Every structure is written in C-alpha cells, then in structure tokens.
Image (spheres, helix red, strand yellow):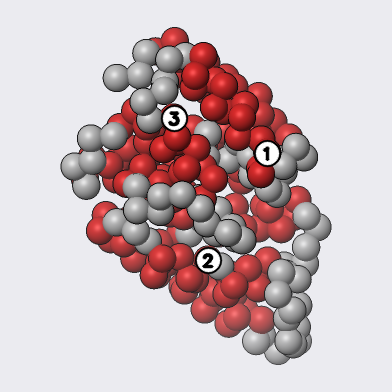
Amino acid sequence: MIDSGIRRAAEQMVQKRVLGYDSGHDWLHTDRVRRMALRIASAENCPDLDAIELAALFHDYYDSKFASDGSGTGYGTVRDFLDENGITGYSERIINAIRNISFSSAEYVGDLKDPVFLIVQDADRLDAIGAIGVARAFNYGGYRNKPIWIPGPDSPGSSTISHFYEKLLLLKDLMNTRTGKELAAERHAFLEIFLMQFHKELEVDM
C-alpha cells in the first residue's frame, strides 16, 4: 500500500497543478479517474493498485491542453517525485501510462500492453462519456469559447457538438478492458440519447 503521507503529497501536488485547468479537468475529475481506475483494477483482478493509483493521480499533470512547459519534457517533475519518495520499482510504468493516455497523442511510445496504462486510460475515457462527459464537453467548449453547434457542415473541432462525433462517440469501441467495455456501453447509450434529443429540438419550426 502507498504510504498515506506519500499519497497526500501526490494529491497536493496535483491539486496545485490543476488550478489553472478548466473545471472539467479539475481535482474532482482526477479523483473520479482514480476511483474508477481502482474499481476497474479490482474487477480485473489486477494487483498493481499502487502504480494504478499514482498513474491516475498524475494522468493529467502534463495535459497538452494546459501545460505550458510541455508534456514532452515535463515528466521529469513526476519522476523526481517518485524517486524522492522511494517509488522506483514501478515509476517507469507510471510515466508510461501518463505519457500515452491522451486520445490525441500523436505518437504512442513504450509499453502499450501494460495493465497500468490500459486501466487508467479506460478510467479517463469513461469520465469523458455519459452524463459527466456531456457536462465536461460543454464546460470545456465554454472555456475555449466554442459555439455549441454550427448549422450545416461543421469543420473538425469548431463546435462542442462536433467533438461528440470526432471523439466521444468513438470511445466505447476503444476501451481496453472487459470492465471498461461494460461500463462504457451504458454511458455511450446516454450520449446517443442526448444527441438525438439535441437534434430533435433543433428541428422545431419558428
């Protein structure tokens, strides 16, 4: 088990880091991902709980949408924290997970079959769909001042609704674990219901 002092230090480090993020990527998101990752790990009988918890805590530490110091060179801070706290046996597995977790990663590197990475990625993707995913999508769209929807052909990334088709609706089929796939099915169904109602309301004659 992770020492409680190390866990609290990691939590405080992440809480400070995400203060500049939008509220869809805040500490509550990180904590949801942590709890979901541990739930999946338990269901999948994965013994790597310490590595999974720390990878989940740090999974957005160098999110390219917010990290001005760049995810490509910034992992040293997390590695230093792990080394300073004697977490050396699985530190590279944690770095591997947070380096590859992004949906939009241009180049995946390292061990993409490591259960630590696969489980934390599923947990993060689950938080992007379902009711919470809808709320987070529109929160981030507002944060970036994107329109909710654009009539007619919608270019990639130009509206929040386009994000559903470019990413969110794809996540169900990208889940790694059996548990992740099962949990994603219900949340995906909610996305479809939401979009059906959204487009239905657009058809109201004025």
Residue 91 - label: 3
- Dot 1, crowdedness within 10 Å: few (<14), some or many (≥20)? few
User: In the rendering, which numbered label is found on residue 73?
Assistant: 1
Residue found 57% across the figure and 75% down from its top:
165
Query: Residue at left 52%, top 56%?
Result: 108
- Circle 2 sits on which residue? 168
Q: Earlier in the sequence, mark 3 or mark 1?
A: 1
Q: In this view, does 50 lie above or below 145?
A: above
* Quarter residue 5 falls in: top left
Quarter of the N terminus within the rendering: top left
Mark 1 near mark 2, Cβ–Cβ under 8 Å? no
Looking at the rendered structure, the kind of residue marked 1 is: Thr
Mark 3: which amino acid?
A: Ser
- Which kind of residue does numbered mark 2 sit on? Leu
Vertical order, 199 against 180 (above or below): below
Residue under the point 19% across and 42% down: 45
Q: Residues within 10 Å of mark 2 (few under 14, many from 20)?
A: many
Cα distance in 3D space between marks 3 and 1 = 16 Å
